Amino acid sequence: MSSPPNRQTFQTRTTSARRSLEESVGEALGAEPTVIFVSSAVARSDREQSGLAGLEAYLIEALDAESQVRLKMENSIGVVERLDIRYQFSIDERMSLLEGDLKNYEFHHVRARDAAARHGGSVGDPESPPRDSGELLPRGPVP
């Protein structure tokens, strides 16, 4: 059987984990979270150092029934709002690119249709392949 972890080891390990967790959860929620680590192994020998006493105190002081419901709703809504903002930005960027692609397509389609009409064919008509008029179509974005 392994020996129980000592208090110093538990505190050292949780310090870096706490920072990482606070940063990532804080970024997702847009607020600094309350983080309380608990070690059941340490609690067997030292209740105070295990984090269990701190967790119990926090629950008793901070979370009555109304607060629990409010916190659950606020956290969920906050996460959804932040995700909505992040993904709406991505959607807007993609829509802008698609609009540019559509304008380019329409521009080149009209040019190809006009060129085909000048040469007696139609765009997309396999019976009448386009002829080389010697005219170069512009590349890149529509002016």
Image (spheres, grey):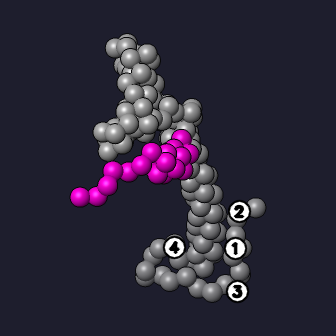
Q: Is residue 21 magenta?
A: yes
Q: Nearer the viewer, mark 3 or mark 2?
A: 2
Instruction: Check disc 1 and report the residue beneath it.
Output: 139
Above or below, 78 against 60 in this view is: below
What is the residue that sits farthest to the left in this orientation? 1
**Residue type marked 2:** Val
Label whose residue precedes the other's in the sequence (3 or 2): 3
Q: Residues within 10 Å of mark 2 (few under 14, many from 20)?
A: few
Q: Main secondary structure of the magenta part?
A: helix
Residue type indicated by callout 4: Ser
Task: Indicate whether 1 appears above or below 118.
Answer: above
Where residue 50 sits: x, y (%)? Answer: 40, 38
Q: Secondary structure at mark 1?
A: loop
At horizontal 71% and vertical 73% (from top left) the residue drawn is 138
Mark yes or no: residue 126 visible: yes
* 50 displayed left or right of 29: left
Residue 72 in sight: no
Nearer-the-camera pick, 26 or 103: 26
Give the alpha-carbon distance from disc 3 to disc 1, as whole Å: 15 Å
Q: Residue 41's spot in the image, x, y percent? A: 32, 45
Q: Position of residue 47 (x, y in %)?
A: 37, 33
Q: Residues within 10 Å of mark 3 (few under 14, many from 20)?
A: few
* Marks 2/4: CA–CA distance: 22 Å
On-image quarter of the C terminus = bottom right
* Foreground: disc 2 or disc 4: 2
The numbered mark, 2 or 4, whose residue comes first in the sequence reads 4
Q: Amino acid at mark 3?
A: Gly
Task: Say whether disc 4 or disc 1 marks the residue closer to the N-terminus.
Answer: 4
Q: CA distance from mark 3 to mark 4?
A: 17 Å
Q: In the image, residue 125 lies at what x, y percent?
A: 45, 76
User: In percent of the image, x 44 and y 18: which residue is there?
Assistant: 62
Q: Which mark is residue 122?
A: 4
